[in-house]
Amino acid sequence: MLAAAGSGRWEFVAPEHDNHHHHDNRTTMNAPLPLPALDEIRQHEDEMVALRRQIHANPELAYEEHATADLVAERLQRWGYAVHRGLGGTGVVGTLRAGTSGRHVGLRADMDALPIAETSGKPWASKVFGKMHACGHDGHTAMLLAAARHLAATRRFDGHLHLVFQPAEEGLAGAKRMLDDGFLKLFPCEAMFGMHNMPGLPEGKFSAVPGFAMASGDTAIIKVRGVGGHGAIPHKAVDAVVAASSIVMALQTIVSRNVDPLHTGIVSVGAFHAGEAPNVLPDEAELRLTVRAFRPDVRDLLEKRIGEIARTQAAVYGASADVNYIRRYPVLNNHARETEFCKQVIRDWLGDDALLGNAEPVSGSEDFAFFLEQVPGCYVFIGNGIGSEGGCMVHNPGYDFNDRVLPTGASYWVRIAEAYLGPQPA
C-alpha cells in the first residue's frame, strides 16, 4: 500500500488488503451486489443519492451555478471547512487542515450542466427545459461532497486538503478562469487530482492513462470571401462555395499526409454555412472545425496546416480566406508519478481487478488539463456502467449518472486524500 516517506512524499510498502465487498441490509437475492465502498461512506448513501438527484433536477449552465455553489458552500461550512467563493465567478473551494504538515493537495469536481433538453424520463429529471446534467457533473459534485463529510469527521490525514468545485467545464474553461483569478496563489497544491464518470466502462471500475490521456480541443473558423453573382452567370463571380468545398476536401489530407502515422490528429468540419437562394452565388462561406490532438507538437502542426491550406486553396479559385484558430483546452497530461500513485491506491484498496487494463486515451477534451499544466496530478475515469445500466453516453439527452457508483467514487477520494497526505504523526 502507500505510506508517507521520510521526505513527506508517499512510498510503496507491502499492501494490506482492505476490500469492502460486502452485502448491506438492502441487498436481496434479485438485487445486484453493492459496489465496493468504505462502510462509513455507505452509511450516508441515501443522502448522497438524494443530493445528486436534487442537483440533477436543477441544472445550471456554465458560470450560472449559483444555487449549486450555495449548496456546496453550505455543506462545507457545516462540516468545518474554510470556504472561499468567487474564483472563476461561481467556483467554491473548501479547505480543511489536519495535523501539523505543511503539505497541500487539491481534489476537483465540476458543477455545470449542458444546454440539452432531457429525455431520460427519470423522476428526478431536469425541471429546467433545455438544460440538463448530461455529463454527470451532478454525480461528481455529490461524490466529492460525500468525501468531504467523511474527511471532516475522521481527519485521518496530515496537511491541507483543498476541495475544488469548479464552474464552466463544458467548453468555457472554468479551470483556466480559476487559475487566472489566483487559485494557486491562494491554495498552493503539490498535486491535483480529478475524476470523471465514463459510460461504457463497467460500473465502479477505474481507468488511469499515464501521459497524454485526453486530447486538446480547439476550434477553427474559416471565412472564405469571393465575389457574389448570379448562379446562371458563374464566370462573373468568384464562387465562395466551390472554394470552401475545396478547402474541406484538402483539410482531409492533414492527418493522412502531415501527421506522423504513429500519432493522432483529428480535423472535423462540423458546419458549412453559405448562401440562401439556389440561383445566387454567395460572396462568403464559413467553415467551423473542431481540431483534436494528443501531443502539443501535433496540435501546433494542425493549426499551421489548417491556415496554410485554407488560404492557398481559396487563392486557387480567386478567393481569400481568413482563419480564426481558437485554442480552447490543452492536451491533458497525466504525470507519471501521480498516475502510478492513483493506480496503486486503487490496487491496494480494491485489488488488481478494479483497475482496467489496456486503458487508452480519450479523444474528448477536459479543462482539468489547465490545472495539470501548472501542477502534477492525475485524472481518472470511473465506469458508469454498460448497456441499459449506465451505458448511455454523456452529452446524450437520455443520459443519467449511475447512483450505484456514488459510494465508490466518494471512497476513492477519501483514499487519495489519506494516502497522499499520509497519517498524522503519533
Image (cartoon, grey):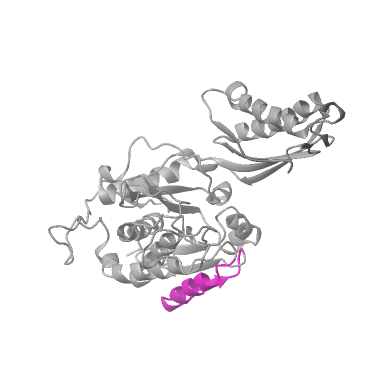
Locate the C terminus and report the quarter of the image it occupies. Answer: bottom left
Give how far across and how far down residue 334 sits, in percent: 48, 43
Q: Which residue is drawn at 44% across and 42% down?
A: 337
Of residues 103 and 179, the one nearer the viewer is 179
Residue 33: horizontal and vertical position, in percent?
19, 56
Q: Is residue 75 magenta?
A: yes
The picture quadrant where one finds residue 274 is: top right
Query: Which residue occupies the extreme right position in the image?
Result: 236
Image mark count: 0
Residue at 16% from the left image edge and 67% from the top image edge: 25
Between 424 and 19, the one lying in front of the other is: 19
Residue 181 lies, with reference to residue 239, above or below; the image says below
Q: Can residue 222 be seen in this view?
A: no
Q: Which residue lies furthest to the top in this view?
A: 257
Figure quadrant of residue 397: bottom left
Q: Give yes or no for residue 97 being in the magenta stretch.
A: no
The stretch of residues the image draws in magenta is 64-88
Q: Is residue 352 left or right of residue 276?
A: left
Q: For this rendering, which residue is in front, 179 or 348?
A: 179
Residue 117 makes an appearance in the image? yes
* Point 65% across, 62% down: residue: 181
Q: Is 216 on the left or on the right of 416, as rendered?
A: right
Q: Which residue lies furthest to the left in this view?
A: 29
**Residue 168 coordinates in the image, percent (x, y):** 57, 59
Q: Position of residue 77 (x, y in %)?
A: 46, 77
Question: In the image, 188: left or right of 314?
Answer: left
